[in-house]
Amino acid sequence: MPRWIYNVEPELTPPGEQRVAELLSSLGEDFTIRWGFYYTEGGGQA
């Protein structure tokens, strides 16, 4: 299992992002995943 660095807990994200987290969990332990997206108030990514 990869090492996770959370900005946002996966269970607090939309279902599509949760599915991506499930898929990423199958990576080997030599991977590090920085999880979480920052959004501006207008809905775009910051």
Image (cartoon, rainbow, N blue to C red):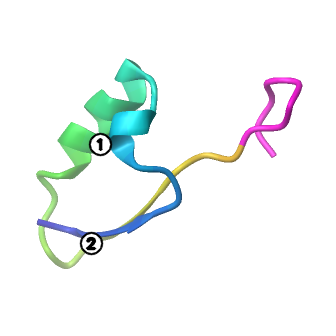
Region in magenta: 39-46
Q: Is residue 31 magenta?
A: no
- For the residue labelled by badge 1, is the local secondary structure a helix, a strand or a loop? helix
Q: Position of residue 13 (x, y in %)?
A: 45, 33
Q: Quadrant of residue 12?
A: top left
**Relative horizontal placement of residue 30, taking residue 18 as reference (left or right):** left
Q: Position of residue 10 (x, y in %)?
A: 36, 43
Q: Is residue 6 above or below residue 46?
A: below
- For the residue labelled by badge 2, is the local secondary structure a helix, a strand or a loop? loop
**Relative horizontal placement of residue 7, taking residue 10 as reference (left or right):** right
Of residues 23 and 38, which is closer to you in this image?
38
- What's the distance in space between the residues labelled 2 and 1, CA to CA? 13 Å
Q: Quadrant of residue 44?
A: top right
First of labels 2, 1 by sequence position: 1
Disc 2 crowd rating (10 Å Cα; few below 14, some 14-19, many 20+) is few
Q: Quadrant of residue 40?
A: top right
Q: Which residue is mark 1?
A: 21
Q: Position of residue 15 (x, y in %)?
A: 36, 20
Q: Which residue is mark 2?
A: 31
Q: Is residue 2 above or below residue 13?
A: below
**Relative horizontal placement of residue 34, taking residue 20 as reference (left or right):** right
Disc 1 crowd rating (10 Å Cα; few below 14, some 14-19, many 20+) is some
Question: Nearer the viewer's eye, disc 2 or disc 1?
Answer: 1
Q: Residue at x 14, y 75 (%)?
A: 29
Of residues 29 and 39, which is closer to you in this image?
39
Q: Residue at x 17, y 52 (%)?
A: 25
Name which residue type carries label 2.
Answer: Phe
